[in-house]
Each structure stands twice: as C-alpha cells, then as structure tokens.
Image: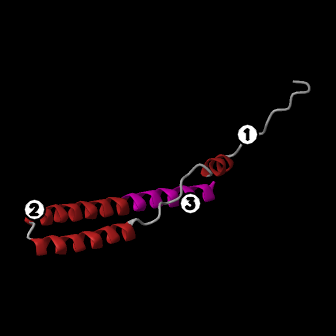
Amino acid sequence: MTGARQKKPRTLKQRIADEKQWLSKVPPPTCPLIDEIQEDLSELRHALETLGASRGINIVCSIKKRLERIRDANDSLRDHGTTWYDLCKEFSNKV
C-alpha cells in the first residue's frame, strides 16, 4: 500500500457524537395549548347550556375527554423520549 493512507476507524463515541446532530429535541409541553382549548370549550358549554342545546353539551364533554387522552399520550411520549435520550447520553459518556 504505497501512497494510500488508511483512515483510522472512528470510535463508537465519535460515531454517536456524529449521529446526535440528527436526534430531535424533546418536544415542548403542549398542555398549555390543551388548557386554552378546554377553557374555550367550557365557555362554549356555558353558552349552549343557556340556549338549552343538550347535544352540544355532550359533544363538548366528549371533546374534553379526548383532549385529556391526548395530554396523557403526550406526557408518556415525552417521558419515553427523555428516558431514551438520557440513556444514550449516559452510554456515550461511558464510551
């Protein structure tokens, strides 16, 4: 091998550092937005109650329950992502 120089293999830590740039950041909390929507829905419910529209009230209650499920799912997803991010960070520090 004259004239050709072999590259030194990158360490696992170097490869992880290179890949880290592609990792997404932990998403910001969406709960404040959900809270705002729930407040708007509460105002809508009050308006519908005064108009006697019971079907509209049921719809609003259903929407609020679904928003709570979204909040729970967001929290779980954020916790999951944070756990994996921390685990990878800890692993890269040991390498």
Q: In screen coordinates, is 95 left or right of 1?
A: left
Q: Which residue is mark 1?
A: 9
Which is in the foreground here, disc 1 or disc 2?
2
Q: In screen coordinates, is 17 left or right of 6?
A: left
Q: Position of residue 70 (x, y in %)?
A: 30, 59
Q: Position of residue 73 (x, y in %)?
A: 32, 59
The answer to which quarter of the image holds residue 53 is bottom left
Q: Looking at the rendered structure, which numbered label has been put on residue 55?
A: 2
Which is in the foreground here, disc 3 or disc 2?
2
Total number of numbered discs in the rendering = 3
Q: Which residues are magenta?
A: 77-95
- The N terminus - image quarter: top right
Question: Which residue shows up at 11% across the image and 71% down it?
Answer: 51
- The C terminus - image quarter: bottom right
Labels 1 and 2: the sequence-earlier one: 1
Q: Compared to 95, does 72 lie above or below?
A: below
Question: Which residue shows up at 27% across the image and 62% down it?
Answer: 67
| SS at mark 3 in the image | helix
Type of colouring: secondary structure
Three-letter code, disc 3:
Glu
Question: Which residue shows up at 47% across the image and 64% down it?
Answer: 28
| Residue closest to the eye, 77 or 57 | 57
What's the distance in space between the residues labelled 3 and 1, CA to CA? 22 Å
Q: Which residue is mark 3?
A: 90
